[in-house]
Amino acid sequence: MRSPRAVLSALIVAGLLVVATPAAASAATGGDEVDPQIAQMLDEIPGGVLIDAHRAVWPALDMEVTVPSGPGGLFARAAVGNCASGRICAFSAGSLSGTSVSWGTCGTLTVPSGFVPRSLANARSSGYAQARNSAGGVLATANAGGWANVGGTAKTVRCVL
């Protein structure tokens, strides 16, 4: 039989773990709750790393998802709108706005399910990027240093150097 002191110690440790766990999760995201789109993609795609409440990366895929934060969801300007230099970006709204998914590699890139690209940017210095439907049909093309709005439902983004 355990002593009352051992039982009390175990209860205190358990209580501290319950209190500390939400605080640690909150600290990892700067006190903000993780955006539902980020949480969904982290659940769906293995290997994701939460950077903050509005951003996650998948190092093995060289993929990044960013959900706008703050008034109007404004970020610092990069090579093509909010698409950083050297990356291919898909946005959930037209004209390079809304949540973005970006890749640093070229090839045929799978668009995460539940994410519907409405614009596409190519912040590379050469080549082109195409939003394609499930049959491989081209919905939009963004040449190097450019962007395009996407009509239809893109399932892949094809990047050609």
Image: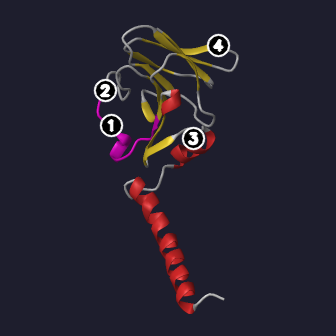
Which residue in the structure is indicated by mark 3? 41
Residue 113 counted in the magenta span: no
**Mark 4, residue position:** 137
Q: Is residue 133 left or right of residue 54?
A: right
CA–CA distance in space, label 1 to label 3 = 21 Å
Please state the horizontal and vertical placement of residue 125, each as a whole percent of the image.
Answer: 36, 11
SS at circle 4? loop
Q: Amino acid at mark 4?
A: Gly
Picture quadrant where residue 14 is located: bottom right
**Can the viewer see residue 78 in this picture?**
yes
Q: Which residue is mark 2?
A: 78
Determine the secondary structure under disc 2: loop
Q: Farthest right residue?
A: 135
Contact (CB < 8 A) between labels 3 and 2? no
- The CA span between labels 3 and 2 is 24 Å
Snapshot quadrant of residue 108: top right
Q: Which residue is painted at 37% across and 41% down in the image?
A: 73
Residue projecting furthest to the left: 76
- Is tag 1's residue or tag 3's residue first in the polypeptide sequence? 3
The numbered disc on residue 75 is 1
The disc at residue 112 is none
* Residue at 33% in and 46% down: 71
- Please provide percent x and percent y for residue 23: 43, 65
Whether pointer 2 and pointer 1 mark residues with C-beta atoms closer than 8 Å, the reply is yes
Q: Which residues are magenta?
A: 65-78
